[in-house]
Image (tube, rainbow, N blue to C red):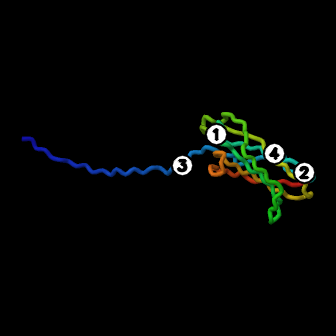
């Protein structure tokens, strides 16, 4: 007769998963540059040079932009606001191998009306990436603010 026994192995089958990290599908570089840091008081145009990364270049999802300028008083009175529903950037593959995202770049113009000399102006650019519907607008990406001086 063969002696047999039952062996029960107990093991702890808990698995600790790493925290979820949402994939980056759209980004704007943290620095937006201006073509110049001062403007003339009779009216001028500020050109924003903007770049970032994006996962989709088909145009199904659009990049929109809001460009705004205010004076630098405590009230931050609005001077100009421009909403661009569909920004059309140039795409390239710079950095694609490391990030898996396409590089995009665009120049956007914000007209500034005549303002008093020595006025300080604060300009801000905010970008969003999503479907072209207000209810589907997602991935809001703000950019840094720049300051200009009126000659």
Viewer-closest of 142 and 113: 113
Asked if marks 1 and 4 touch (Cβ < 8 Å), the reply is no
Asked if marks 4 and 3 touch (Cβ < 8 Å), the reply is no
> Mark 1 or mark 2, which is nearer the start of the sequence?
2
In space, the residues marked 4 and 3 are separated at their CA atoms by 35 Å
Q: Which mark is residue 86?
A: none
Where residue 111 appears, as percent x and y from the top left, is 85, 49
In space, the residues marked 2 and 4 are separated at their CA atoms by 13 Å
SS at circle 1: loop
Viewer-closest of 99 and 65: 65
Please say whether residue 146 is visible from this viewpoint.
no
Q: Residue drawn at (72%, 36%), measured in percent from left and top?
A: 90
Where residue 120 appears, as percent x and y from the top left, is 85, 58
Q: Nearer the viewer, mark 4 or mark 3?
A: 4
In space, the residues marked 2 and 3 are separated at their CA atoms by 46 Å
Q: Which mark is residue 21?
A: 3
Tell whether 113 sits left or right of 28.
right
Please tell me in which quadrant of the rendered image residue 114 appears: bottom right
Number of residues whose C-alpha sits closer than 10 Å to that of mark 3, classed few (under 14), some (14–19) or many (20 or more): few
In space, the residues marked 3 and 1 are separated at their CA atoms by 24 Å
SS at circle 4: strand
> Mark 3 or mark 4, which is nearer the start of the sequence?
3
Q: Residue drawn at (75%, 40%), measured in percent from left and top?
A: 106
Where residue 80 appears, as percent x and y from the top left, is 82, 54
SS at circle 3: loop
Give the residue number, with chain letter if any, for mark 2: 43
Image quadrant occupied by the N terminus: top left
SS at circle 2: loop
Please say whether residue 116 is visible from this viewpoint.
yes
Q: Nearer the viewer, mark 2 or mark 3?
A: 2
């Amino acid at each position: 007769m063969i002696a047999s026994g039952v062996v029960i192995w107990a093991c702890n089958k808990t698995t600790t998963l790493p925290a979820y990290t949402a994939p980056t599908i759209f980004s704007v570089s943290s620095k937006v540059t201006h073509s110049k840091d001062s403007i003339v008081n009779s009216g001028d145009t500020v050109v924003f040079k903007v770049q970032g990364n994006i996962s989709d270049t088909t145009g199904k999802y659009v990049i929109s932009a809001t460009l705004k300028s205010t004076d630098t008083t405590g009230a931050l009175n609005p001077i100009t606001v421009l909403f661009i529903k569909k920004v059309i950037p140039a795409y390239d593959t710079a950095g694609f191998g490391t990030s898996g995202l396409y590089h995009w770049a665009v120049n956007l113009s914000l007209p500034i009306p005549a303002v008093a000399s020595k006025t300080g102006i604060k300009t801000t650019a905010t970008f969003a990436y999503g479907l072209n519907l207000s209810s589907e607008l997602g991935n809001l990406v703000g950019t840094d603010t720049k300051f200009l001086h009126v000659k």
